[in-house]
Image (cartoon, rainbow, N blue to C red):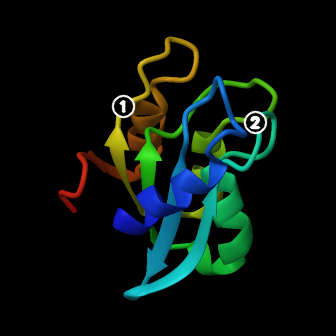
Amino acid sequence: MARALDLASAGWGRVSPNPLVGAVIVREDQIVGEGFHASLGAVHAEVAALTVAAERAAGGTMFVTLEPCRHHGRTPPCSVAIIAAGIRRVVYAVSDPTETAGGGAAELRAAGVEVSSGLMTA
């Protein structure tokens, strides 16, 4: 999670009004993908990390600073991309408080992904 927090800061000044978000994918104790939300309207951190990890994401754990989104906006829902990539576990630092984007954790759980939350607890 510490690495995800570091990555998130790379979007400073470029993503407002959206939050700074970083994501790291780990598989077999190795980082296989990482990303951050780089600019308003660009792919979200989760999708950026999934793109880097490619097929290595399957069966991995994603650490992300914000609950993955579930809404269709400028970008497709991160929850759908995470499920499609075969991520087995997601650990997020804080819940998304917005009505439109929040709820991604519930979608992930419904699809059989193990989900937990809390800053620096996993």
Q: Which mark is residue 21?
A: none
Q: Is residue 46 above or below residue 12?
A: below
Q: Nearer the N terminus, badge 2 or badge 1?
A: 2
Residue 71 place in picture, x, y as percent: 65, 24
Residue drawn at x 68%, y 45% is 44
Q: Is residue 66 above or below residue 85?
A: above
Q: Amino acid at mark 1?
A: Ser
Near mark 1 (Cα within 10 A), the count class, few <14, some 14-19 or many ≥20, is: some
Secondary structure beneath dot 2 equals loop
Query: From the viewer's perspective, is the residue at label 2 or at label 1 nearer?
Result: 1
Residue 73 place in picture, x, y as percent: 76, 24
Residue 3 place in picture, x, y as percent: 43, 68
Instruction: State the quadrant of the N terminus.
Output: bottom left
Quarter of the image for residue 88 reads bottom left
Q: Which mark is residue 95?
A: 1
Instruction: State the quadrant of the C terminus.
Output: bottom left
Q: Amino acid at mark 2?
A: Pro
Residue drawn at x 65%, y 75% is 53
Q: Which residue is mark 2?
A: 76
Q: How many marks?
A: 2
Residue 15 located left or right of residue 107: right
Residue 27 place in picture, x, y as percent: 45, 81
Q: Is residue 38 above or below residue 98?
A: below
Residue at the left extreme? Answer: 121
Secondary structure beneath dot 1 equals loop
Residue 83 located left or right of residue 27: right
Near mark 2 (Cα within 10 A), the count class, few <14, some 14-19 or many ≥20, is: some
Residue drawn at x 58%, y 30% is 70
Residue 99 located left or right of residue 46: left
Residue drawn at x 54%, y 46% is 21
